[in-house]
Amino acid sequence: MDDPATTATADRIIAVPQDRPVWTAVRRGVLRRCPHCGEGRLFDGYLKVADCCASCGEVLRHHRADDGPAYLTILVVGHLIAFLMHFVWVTFRPEPLVFATILTVFAVGLSLWLLPRFKGAIVGYQWAHRMHGFDDGR
């Protein structure tokens, strides 16, 4: 009864899940690590989430990141590109082909870098809030 993870109601004891640190899990996700232990790799490939952590055995296949990472990537990259387009055009007036090439390479590179980090953050957030089956434990 002294355990904070249990609550007594009438004739039965109900287990109350322990809190999971949200920002720690999100940070570990951004670093593409397991949100539980921070040691194992979160992804098997570029964007495929591992079924379970190789270090702690935490089941990770419950995630439902769907279009969230792509939306966040487009949001961030689009705003940065818009700012850079204005700044570079007003300051330097480059040739249009050079201008388009540089901004395209920057946009693609930044998108490819951000996408797995945003997906990891969303998986970490879902794990910390016990969403989509992450509440079942290991």
Image (cartoon, rainbow, N blue to C red):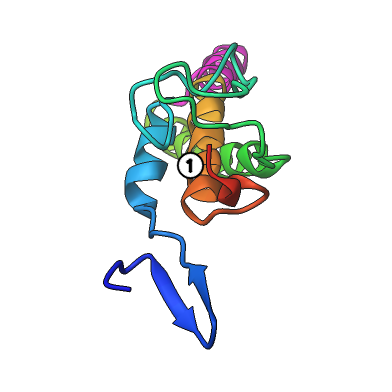
Is the residue marked by circle 1 packed among few (<14), some (14-19), or many (20+) residues within 10 Å?
many
Does residue 115 appear to the left or right of 17 in the view shown?
Answer: right
Residue 15, x across and y down, in percent: 48, 65
Does residue 28 appear to the left or right of 60 in the view shown?
Answer: left
**Kind of residue sitting beneath label 1:** Gly
Residue 113, x across and y down, in percent: 49, 21
Residue 63, x across and y down, in percent: 64, 39
Q: Quadrant of the N terminus?
A: bottom left
Is residue 82 in sight in this rendering? no
Which residue in the rendered view is the most extreme toward the bottom? 10
Q: Is residue 95 magenta?
A: yes
Does residue 15 lie above or below 70 as drawn? below
Toward the viewer: 20 or 107?
20
In which quarter of the view is residue 40 placed? top left
Does residue 19 lie above or below 128 as drawn? below
The number of numbered discs placed on residues in the rendered structure image is 1
For mark 1, what is the residue?
124
State which region is magenta: 93-109
In which quarter of the view is residue 100 placed? top right
Magenta region's main secondary structure? helix
Toward the viewer: 48 or 93?
48
* SS at badge 1: helix
Toward the viewer: 2 or 72?
2
